[in-house]
Image: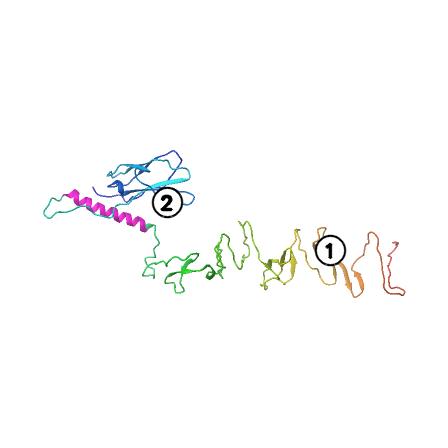
Amino acid sequence: MPLSSTTTKTAIFAGNGSTTSFSYGFIADAEGDVEIILITNSTRAEVIQTIVTHYTLTGIGNVLGGKFNMVTAPTSSQSVMARRKPTLTQGTNLITQGAYSADTHEDIVNKNVQISQYIDEILGRGVTVAIGGTLGSGLELPEPVASNVLGWNAAATAIVNYTNAAVGIPNTHVDNVLIKTDGTNSGDYQVTGLVVSDGNNISGINSLFLDEQAAADADVVGDGQVWVRNDAPNTLMFTDDAGTDHVVSGATALNGLGTVDTIPLWTPNGNTLGNSALTQSGSDLTGAGNLTLRGTALLLSSSTGAGVNSLAVVNTDAI
């Protein structure tokens, strides 16, 4: 009969630890033409099963297929499937002036169609180039090199090996891309720089390790930078766009160096909120408003003479 179906494999059946019988819907001329594959779900590792040892078959020669029965039920962490894998040989011997029936001829043709369908299924899972593409000779992969990555050469005519160090961070915006740049083949991504464009966030990171350094990097216009100063212990620093360094503390404000010749305002946890109205001009302490003293004020002088130390009393206030 004609081979009108293009089905060559089953769906992937999920195991449950109890089901052992599964259906296949393609014709197979011999038991050896059916391949059963057991899959580990977590790794997608595939193991070809052995007939009798791992499974039995029914429906051989039936155009509608049949069933394969597993000796041991696949577990919930496994899946199983079947495919037709015809032998790549032709066993019919045609004798000159011998008997030759239509069934014999049809079997030979059907076997060739089965092989064609088998190859077509494999090609359907392969990497191909566009029909109208300019890469006329197709794709050829280089020999594997440990810890290298594959990429197009400069002329875009072949795929070659590149070391991790040769692959840099893109200089244009690329979404969802993080590339190793130091050649270290480890479980962590190690990059020489990380730039997050406006309106975007860094998320899904458990830990972010920053190398120690003595000073901030060169300023980039419009950007601030967070870095770790190589003190003992380390100090987390923030450098603003003006190039001013600030120590990052655990409070809500930044602990800064203050402004020259001013007395800063301090929060209880030691962070600056800005400058007070008091300023130092030469040897005098001047203020834009009133100076309120709580507690005891001790005035000392290293000079003699009238008026060296004085305290002005306003209105009826007393000292």
Disc 2 on helix, strand or loop? strand
Displayed quadrant of residue 155: bottom left
* Picture residue at 28% right of the left edge, 50% below the top: 119
* Picture residue at 29% right of the left edge, 50% below the top: 120
Displayed quadrant of residue 39: top left
Q: Is residue 109 visible?
A: yes
Q: Of 10 and 273, which appears nearest the observer? A: 10
- Is disc 2 surrounded by few (<14), some (14 to 19) or many (20+) residues within 10 Å? some
Quarter the C terminus occupies: bottom right
Inspect the magenta stretch and tell me whether residue 17 lies in it. Answer: no
Q: Residue furthest top?
A: 18
Residue pointed to by mark 1: 265
Q: Position of residue 56 (x, y in %)?
A: 30, 36
Inspect the magenta stretch and tell me whether residue 107 lies in it. Answer: yes
Q: Residue furthest left?
A: 97
> Which contiguous range is marked in magenta?
101-123
Q: Amino acid at mark 1?
A: Leu
Q: Position of residue 220 (x, y in %)?
A: 58, 63
* Picture residue at 77% right of the left edge, 63% below the top: 280
* Picture residue at 65% right of the left edge, 60% below the top: 245
